[in-house]
Amino acid sequence: MAELNLVEAINRAQAWEMAHDPSVVVLGEDVGVNGGVFRATVGLQEQFGPERVIDTPLAETAIVGTAIGMAAMGLKPVAEIQFSGFIYPAMDHIWNHSGRLRNRTRGRLSCPLVVRSPCGAGIHAPEHHSESPEALFAHLPGVRVVIPSSPSRAYGLLLAAIRDPDPVIFLEPTRLYRLFKQEVADDGEALPLDVCFTLRAGTDVTLVSWGAMLTETQAAADALAQEGIMAEVIDVATLKPLDMPTILESVARTGRCVIVHEATRAGGFGAEIAANLAEHGLYSLLAPVQRVTAWDVVVPLSRLEHQYMPSVERIVAAVRKTLEGA
């Protein structure tokens, strides 16, 4: 066991897989000599050589297109996009090729590709370094979307993503990279994809979130507990495919749900969860589902960043609203 922050856990997961599977390669801008802009790949090129840890040109389309070709031919590429706001040039390859390759070839080829990218606000970066684009990728058939919320989950989920035979978009909240450390066993044990993690049991309301927003969500649960309100906290972790049964089972116990995410509200992934609750869990609900999200604006400059992001106070207020008249 070692005390690791999230970026160290991501580094250890890549190193483990590269040491135990020679088909795993890492590629991206500055991932080799410089060890990545956030140091997520530091030391990997020295350990595994430049043929397996490949510095690429500043060309996201080329990075992902090359990685798809590698994956189709039997390698397991882990491609880093330096910031999520730079991933859009590669969307053609992600949308039209990576997720369709198995279907297009009737199973003859698969695409064991991981595209890693930092995401989210909170580090005082410009807007295209601070976006939360998970809903875009969750809309793509054939593509998994994973967002870790802690070092231990980052380690286990990244191992599972690299071992998955189909493409995975692995979004890493930059605000969590060095926010806290956690005991992580560097033993190569993966966590399951496609399942939610219940972080806290409760009886009064279900709080559903993912990524960096679990920090505020759990702080809100602590504050509510001081008032005698017991919140169940669920970490979605894998947004696509969504483990809706876990959320439905929780809401059946609590009768209320508040969904928290950092992405903007309109078309956000929280709307998909709310729609599923309306379709399959309506009779369990004692109050309308509440969403606490960022505002529908471009990510502001750093002085206004914390007003843009959901806060503990906004989450607590949403919970109180679900309890009105109870």
Image (cartoon, rainbow, N blue to C red):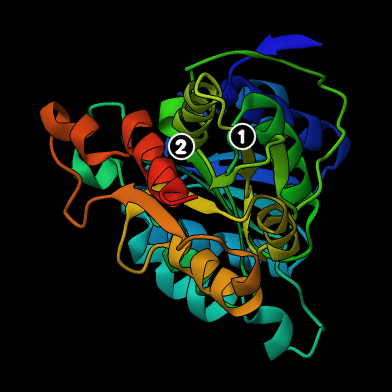
Identify the residue at image location x=59%, y=79%.
279
| 301 relative position to 223: left or right | left
| Quarter of the image where the N terminus is located | top right
Q: Position of residue 44 (x, y in %)?
A: 64, 26
- As helix, strand or loop, the secondary structure at mark 1 comes to loop
The answer to whether one can see residue 90 in this image is yes
| 143 relative position to 269: left or right | right
Classify mark 2: residues with Cα within 10 Å, few (<14), some (14-19) or many (20+): many
| 272 relative position to 77: left or right | left
Classify mark 1: residues with Cα within 10 Å, few (<14), some (14-19) or many (20+): some
Q: Which mark is residue 50?
A: 1
Q: Position of residue 114 (x, y in %)?
A: 63, 53
Q: How many marks?
A: 2
Q: Quadrant of residue 202?
A: top right
Of residue 203 and residue 44, the one placed in the foreground of this image is 203
Q: Which mark is residue 213?
A: 2
